[in-house]
Amino acid sequence: MLLEMSFSELKINLAHLDHVLKNAGFISDATWDYDHATYDFKYDDRTTNAVYYLRIRGHVVDGGDLHPEAILQLEEPHIGKHLFPHGIDYQAEIPAAILEAAKKKLSDVKAKLA
């Protein structure tokens, strides 16, 4: 599910983006490529034992590879349900409590990126 939060308007220095998102609990291990970065925040739904991921992606628009001084253009965040053994279903229905928590997380992150 696409979460329209005006993230696509943001161009951010990679070092700053990495700092803010890691401090907010996002992980980026094994999700970097030469010209884009992906950060995930995990939500566990204890009532259904389902796992959901809030994902923020960005791609390099200035500075080459993922050098700390590179500038990334962010994309609109997505949230989806984890599929076993791997994959994310972005069409799955997201529980209201998780969706609200994700929107709050994004709002807090956006304020720190500005």
Image (cartoon, rainbow, N blue to C red):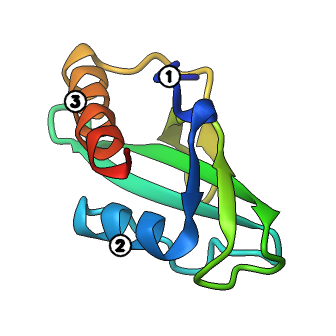
Disc 2/disc 1 C-alpha distance (Å): 22 Å
52, above or below 1, in the image: below
Q: Position of residue 41 (x, y in %)?
A: 37, 53
Residue shown at the point (46%, 64%) measured from the top left: 17
Disc 3/disc 1 C-alpha distance (Å): 11 Å
Graded by Cα atoms within 10 Å as few (under 14), some (14 to 19) or many (20 or more), the crowding at tag 1 reads: some
Question: Regarding mark 3 in the picture, which secondary structure is present there?
Answer: helix
Residue shown at the point (39%, 21%) measured from the top left: 94
| Residue type beneath disc 2 | His
Q: Say how many tags the image has.
A: 3
Residue shown at the point (28%, 40%) measured from the top left: 111
Q: Quadrant of residue 107?
A: top left
Depth check: 23 or 54 in front? 23
**Residue, disc 2:** 19
**Residue, disc 3:** 104
Circle nearer the viewer, 2 or 1: 2
Residue 25 in the figure: left or right of residue 56:
left
Residue 3, which numbered label?
1
Sequence-earlier tag: 2 or 1: 1
Graded by Cα atoms within 10 Å as few (under 14), some (14 to 19) or many (20 or more), the crowding at tag 3 reads: few
Q: Position of residue 45 (x, y in %)?
A: 23, 38
52, above or below 23, in the image: above
Q: Position of residue 75 (x, y in %)?
A: 65, 39
Residue 31 in the figure: left or right of residue 60:
left
Do the residues under discs 3 and 1 have CB atoms within 8 angstroms? no
